[in-house]
Image: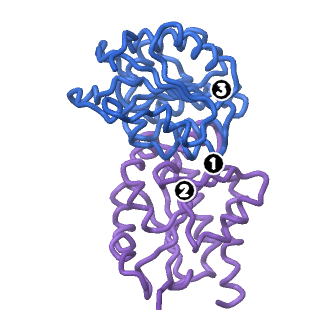
Amino acid sequence: MDKEAANWPTEIFNVLKARNIKQVCHVPDAGHDQLIRLCTAHNDMAVTTLTTEEEGVGILAGAWLGGQRGVLLMQSSGVGNTINALALPATCRMPFLTIVTMRGEWGEGNPWQIPMGQGAPGALEAMGVTLFRVNRAEDMTDTVNAAAGQAFNNQCAAAVLISQRVIGAKGFE
Amino acid sequence: MSSALERRGVVRALLAPRKPELLVVGGIGSSSWDIAAIADNPRDFCLVGGMGLAVPLGLGLAIARPNNRILVITGDGDMLMGMGALATVAQHQPQNLMMVVLDNERYGETGSQPTHTAGVTDLAAIAAGAGIPQTSTVRSESELSGMIRTIHEDEGPAFYVVKISGDMPETVLPSLDGAFVKDRFRASVLEN
């Protein structure tokens, strides 16, 4: 991984700070590890580790009701856990922002990641979530910023899907 | 075990000492009907979907509003669907979050099929095991009085199971327009 590519978690963190994100919910993912550490070290963000991803949808709805912006960090397998919960921001016209690290799509080494990784974009779109894809690290800042603007300016749901091409394929070989 | 406590009377007593800083989250189904039956308060957010999300929503609100007291009122079905959230709450130990489960040991809205709490499952023990420091199961009027005092005056997080009878009072719907309820809630809470 070259130096520029390695900095993309910091770029996401800087966008989240600039967008006044106060609550960060996550089920940890290796692809999000550096970003989670940056958020945890930042005094102005409440970081919540979830037992399952749909909790994050509820927590962020509560955050918005209380005047705070948040983000849900998860991997593509977690998208499936959020589906019914996404009715909450949709029905209530609340902003919802998630940043998803994709698996099962770019030289994946674990066959168990394929079904939900391949299904995640369609599942999100079925629930009315607008997708913002990042296939190259140099597009990270602009894309995350656009997704945050889409969500918070329009009170709708937006997901950034970070390609496994950016993160690096994981395998057992 | 059956209980003599009746759900709407419990919620009426629970909300009677209400102060303006109290924000109420209602879980899907009868708990939301009970809250709506007491008053149409802009500082109530009653879920009519999103099963399993009442406690998470209360947690996000508690973090965002440290100077407000948050009361989640939900049912055993909703709580059983989102039990992991109790462990998530315990990580934060929010002093301003109070949780009450109205436990009629059944899925009241769908034909009164028994839930796990009709059998051997003990939600208060689960909450204690998750790391909620104050948990109790309430079965009598005197225990209810102590719970209500704690909820309005003491530090949380606290988690109570109130065993109620299976009586189904009249359905009183909150507004089903979630966007309206959300905007009204925010307008009321964020201006003060």
Closest to the observer: B149 or A164? B149
> Secondary structure beneath disc 3?
strand
The mark closer to the camera, 2 or 3, is 3
Vertical arrangement, residue A157 with respect to residue B144, above or below: below
Q: Which residue is mark 1?
A: A69
Within-10-Å neighbours for mark 2: few <14, some 14–19, many 20+: many
Closest to the observer: B98 or B70? B98
User: Percent x, y for residue B10?
Assistant: 45, 12
Residue in the image at 77% along x and 60% along y: A41
| Drawing shade for chain B | blue
Q: Amino acid at mark 2?
A: Leu
User: Percent x, y for residue A64?
Assistant: 59, 42
Q: Hey, which residue is sitting farthest left in the picture?
A: B111
- N-terminal-most mark, 2 or 1: 1
Vertical arrangement, residue A83 with respect to residue B144, above or below: below
User: Percent x, y for residue A69?
Assistant: 63, 48
Chain for numbered disc 2: A
Q: Which residue is mark 3?
A: B69
Q: Give the image quarter of residue B102.
A: top left
Residue in the image at 54% along x and 13% along y: B15
Closest to the observer: A85 or B130? B130
> Secondary structure beneath disc 2?
strand
User: Percent x, y for residue B95?
Assistant: 69, 32
Q: Is residue A135 visible?
A: yes
